[in-house]
Image: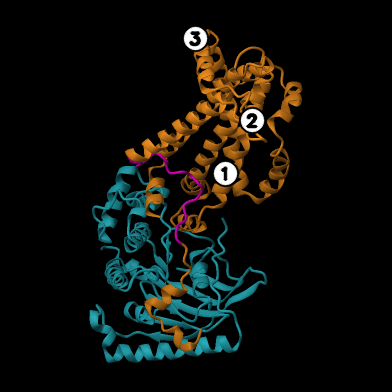
């Protein structure tokens, strides 16, 4: 890829003292004092107790939410709303049920005015990239959960995003499918190298995939610790039984469990936060 | 939840996940005849035959059940004779075409207005607050109550009649459209905006197709209620229309003819509702697939 050097740099996310308040019965602070920088092309996971604001933070980077404090910039530009440069993958697919897999993947190109023929050709390529050659004409309801997420990923990647935001994308899949999807994602990430910000409940998943793991505190979520995952890439399939991996996992587990304990002591309701999207 | 329960295993993760399967919107009947086996069709036909046979026996023997009596009810054979008479009448064509025009004109306007209003009301809280209250007040008013005003408001009796069939169809279309728009999964809108869709594209690519199953349901019901109002509408009519024929038969005490008129309306109403559903299925091949996999 000739643009390898520039894509390496693109997708830098700067979070500077971010706080986000969410509306509810009582307006509450979901995250506070978030300051970190994610380099272009980096793979970063966010873990933490339920309701700690992981998804909220992701939604702010996507542009669905405005921070109530601080500055949020991607490649130096303030985020002002959702856009195709920051693709979003949810836990449950959000494919258009009335479009075939191919047309779903081609959707972003249609929005940017690419002609029908060209966008279909490119959508075929991206379906092939996620291993779904021959499934072009299927509707989402005719695909398995893993396939739906593959289409979702292809649909985001076709826009050549600088940043891919993933909110527990494999959380609803069975263990084997989940592992295959992780390998698939790593393969694609290695080739296209977007910045990935990945929210998960699964410490193993975070460690297998990421360069760095952000452990968040209980609500209001702050960054408790940043753990650098200095495991070699490409990572072998049995990486999760290596002593280095297990050491990292113990550290993460201790941190998360401590936060869960504190959130229970604090009597805070461990609730999922709905996505307040302007519709 | 204890600390150890937060074993971040896939099982635990999926247990805490908000189970939100795609629920097909609207109560669209996915083609009741689609995939019916021959024995079930035979059973349905048999049930119809048994109903008519009961009716015949009850009418011939002047069945009296105390609170309901069949003494004056014409038997199916008499109704068949009356129907034969109507079929041979030179007026039949005028009756049918006049009624079809009135129903389809009223329904057509109701469909256009109901869908348009439903889409904007479903998308805008302000329009919902301003437009819906007056419409809600008008909704329970039956067609027959509109007759005097309809006559006063419109220059011709033809338009008055179309107005009444229009009122019959409007609310099912409107309310189902609003429901369809409001039931759209907001994540679909969110993710299409992340894929570069602007305001208009969100509307054309997500809101419109997303509301369509509900809209089709509303149209099918509205088609039925439009026929439902036909007799009321054609009370105003001078000489033609199936509703007029039925009403005239009542004033002339031709009981068999009344039943013929009723059956005509029933048959036409059912057929045109079926037509709407068929069009809906052709328009939304994805919807049946989704139903089947739900």
Q: Chain of mark 3?
A: B
Residue A206 in percent (x, y) is at 37, 79
Q: Which mark is residue B176?
A: 1
Residue A25 in percent (x, y) is at 67, 69
What segment is highlighted magenta in the picture? B21-37
Residue for badge 2? B69
Mark whose residue sits in front, 2 or 1 = 2
* Vertical position of residue A223 compared to residue B37: above or below: below
Relative depth, front residue between B21 and A99 = B21
Q: Chain of mark 1?
A: B
Q: Secondary structure at mark 1?
A: helix
Q: Colour of chain A?
A: cyan
Q: Earlier in the sequence, mark 2 or mark 1?
A: 2
Estimate the spatial distance between the alpha carbons at disc 1 and disc 3, rounded to whole Å: 41 Å
As drawn, is B171 to the left or to the right of B52?
right
Estimate the spatial distance between the alpha carbons at disc 2 and disc 1, rounded to whole Å: 39 Å
Can residue B104 be spotted in the picture?
Answer: no
Relative depth, front residue between B242 and A183 = B242
């Amino acid at each position: 890829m000739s643009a390898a050097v520039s894509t390496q740099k693109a997708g830098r996310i700067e979070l500077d003292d971010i706080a986000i308040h969410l509306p509810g019965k009582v307006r509450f602070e979901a995250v506070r004092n978030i300051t970190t920088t994610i380099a272009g092309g980096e793979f970063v996971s966010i873990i933490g107790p339920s309701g700690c604001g992981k998804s909220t933070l992701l939604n702010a980077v996507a542009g669905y939410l405005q921070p109530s404090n601080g500055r949020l910039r991607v490649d130096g530009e303030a985020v002002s709303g959702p856009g195709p440069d920051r693709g979003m993958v949810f836990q449950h697919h959000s494919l258009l049920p009335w479009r075939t897999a191919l047309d779903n993947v081609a959707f972003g190109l249609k929005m940017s005015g690419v002609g029908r023929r060209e966008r279909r050709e490119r959508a075929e390529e991206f379906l092939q990239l996620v291993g779904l050659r021959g499934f072009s004409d299927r509707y989402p309801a005719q695909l398995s959960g893993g396939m739906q997420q593959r289409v979702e990923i292809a649909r985001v990647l076709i826009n050549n995003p600088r940043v891919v935001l993933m909110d527990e994308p494999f959380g609803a899949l069975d263990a084997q499918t989940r592992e295959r999807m992780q390998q698939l994602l790593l393969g694609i990430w290695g080739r296209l190298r977007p910045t990935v910000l990945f929210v998960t409940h699964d410490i193993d998943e975070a460690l297998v995939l990421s360069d760095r793991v952000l452990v968040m505190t209980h609500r209001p979520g702050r960054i408790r610790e940043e753990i650098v995952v200095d495991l070699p890439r490409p990572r072998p399939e049995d990486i999760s039984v290596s002593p280095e991996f297990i050491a990292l996992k113990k550290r993460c587990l201790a941190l998360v469990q401590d936060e869960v304990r504190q959130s229970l002591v604090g009597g805070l309701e461990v609730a999922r936060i709905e996505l307040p999207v302007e519709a | 939840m204890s600390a150890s329960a937060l074993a971040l295993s896939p099982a635990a993760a999926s247990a805490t996940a908000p189970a939100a399967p795609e629920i097909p919107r609207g109560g669209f009947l996915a083609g009741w005849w689609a995939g019916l086996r021959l024995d079930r069709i035979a059973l349905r036909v048999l049930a119809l035959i048994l109903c008519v046979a009961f009716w015949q026996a009850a009418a011939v023997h002047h069945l009296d059940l105390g609170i309901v009596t069949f003494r004056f009810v014409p038997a199916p054979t008499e109704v068949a004779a009356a129907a034969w008479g109507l079929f041979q009448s030179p007026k039949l064509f005028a009756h049918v075409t006049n009624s079809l025009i009135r129903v389809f004109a009223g329904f057509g306007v109701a469909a256009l207005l109901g869908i348009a209003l439903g889409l904007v009301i479903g998308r805008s809280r302000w329009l919902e607050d301003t437009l819906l209250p007056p419409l809600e007040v008008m909704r329970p008013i039956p067609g027959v109550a509109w007759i005097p005003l309809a006559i006063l408001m419109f220059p011709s009796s033809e338009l008055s009649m179309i107005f009444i069939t229009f009122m019959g169809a409007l609310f099912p279309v409107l309310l189902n459209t609003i429901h369809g728009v409001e039931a759209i999964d907001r994540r679909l809108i969110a993710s299409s905006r992340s894929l570069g869709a602007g305001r208009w594209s969100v509307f054309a690519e997500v809101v419109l197709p997303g509301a369509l199953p509900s809209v089709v349901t509303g149209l099918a019901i509205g088609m039925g209620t439009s026929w439902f109002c036909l007799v009321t509408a054609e009370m105003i009519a001078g000489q033609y229309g199936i509703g007029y024929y039925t009403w005239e038969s009542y004033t002339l005490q031709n009981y068999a003819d009344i039943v013929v008129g009723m059956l005509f309306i029933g048959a036409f109403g059912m057929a045109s509702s079926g037509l709407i559903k068929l069009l809906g299925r052709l328009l939304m091949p994805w919807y049946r697939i989704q139903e089947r996999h739900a």
